[in-house]
Image: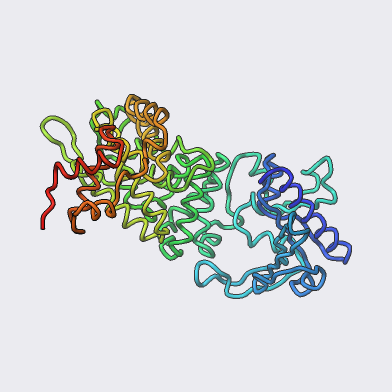
Amino acid sequence: MDMASSSGQYDAALEIVKRLRTEGYDAYLAGGCVRDLLLGREPSDYDVATSATPDIVLDLFPRTFAVGAHFGVVLVAQGERETYFTTEVATFRSDGAYSDGRHPDAVRYTTSAEEDVKRRDFTINGLLLNPLQSVGNTRAAVLDFVGGVSDLDAGLVRAIGRAQERFEEDHLRMLRGVRFAARFQFDLADETKRAMRVLAGKIAAVSRERVRDELTKMLTEGHARRAFELLDETGLLAEVLPEIARMKGVEQPPQFHPEGDVWVHTLGLLSQLESGCPATLAWGALLHDVGKPPTFRRAPDRIRFDGHVEIGVAIGGEILRRFRFSNDDTRQILALVENHMRFMDTPRMKTSTLKRFFRLDKFDEHLALHKMDCLAGSGHLDNWEFVRERLQNMPEEAVRPRPLITGRELIAAGYKPGAAFKQMLRAVEDAQLEGIIATEEEALRLVKDRWQIRD
């Protein structure tokens, strides 16, 4: 979010708090935005918590959406079309039992801000802020019933109340806790971490889409390595991605991988993923060697992983289907897995083969993955530098030239449509990419030299 947008979001939330307080209701900024303000980070959005019930909120503001009124949540829209902001306004509440491991069976509204905070997930997310008092001293305006400020200072992610109860209520909170700890480079509080280990198996009850989204955030927030180390330490990794957990202890040939086993190597790639990187690149980095554990063998000359790319594509496909990735994302991630070893052959590729390699969708992601792969292993970037140099010095029209002929010209030359057309056009394109031919006449001559016209 840019600063202008962030300022607009804050101003919108501030106006809501003012109006609610003018009408006699308690109202605070709540949750992640308060945490981020105290950490000196720019919040991505601002939420308001209030003693006003949803029907009152709906009446007080002209443009509202009762998106979660059953749980006391109303969206309030403000501003004009060019500067349109929505703020989530939630009524103080206490929750009943969570029999489905996600939603409370019943919600009871309350006028107690403390009661509302104590049903939330983590202390650092349980802070309230009166923005009307926060000018010049944010901390002085914070309402903290759960020790969230001291946990922010100590760098701890701690569940509110009894950790096991919080995770029994909503199992996804375990993954969220790992993500917050990684994002802020915090530690998990001891009781919170122990509860995750005890309840890790419960994560299987969470929808695969919700798990996928949490994992994707972990991979793309700039601290993927720390996130996956914590997933492993809490036992959650073996539950959500057993194929990745199996990388641990799988040796690699030290002459090519002095860094260690497949798990250590994969962590080396994750440590290079920058905040905001494409999700497909991040998942490609995670899965690129997923075929190594089942193909490991100790040959007389060295450790080998014969067919690990093909097996990796198959395993990766199963994982992506399990997490219900879109078809487009699945194709790109599997293409990254399938092609990550081809870079070692690039110096010996024919020009036509190299150009076709460059035509892979989002080739910049393939190039980025190869660089990370090298830096997490031998450190040698010879092939990456070769490909980058060739790519930079090769104009787009040379990589994707206009076809010299099509099936129409072949028919006009006397050939009957059939399976051979594909071979003919491929041969013409190869010669064109190699720079051997450059005109329609030369293309037709090549075809006639290799394929006789039959009656």
Q: Is residue 300 left or right of residue 248?
A: left
- The image quadrant that residue 18 belongs to is bottom right
Name the colour scheme: rainbow
Quadrant (top left, top right, bottom left, bottom right) of the C terminus: bottom left
Total marks in image? 0
* Left or right of 38, for residue 215: left
- What percent of the width, then of the height, locates residue 418? 19, 58
Residue 11 picture location, percent across and down: 79, 52
Q: Is residue 412 above or below residue 41?
A: below
Instruction: Indicate whether 51 appears above or below 226.
Output: below
Which residue is depicted at the point 33% across and 24% down? 382
User: Where, by quadrant of the figure, is residue 393 drawn?
Assistant: top left
Q: Indicate the position of residue 358 as horizontal and vertical percent values.
A: 35, 38
Residue at the image position 72 percent from the left and 67 percent from the top: 91
Image position, residue 445 (x, y; %): 20, 41
The residue at 36%/40% (across/down) is 401
Residue occupying the point 20% across, 49% down: 423
Report the side of 148 relative to 133 (left or right).
Answer: left
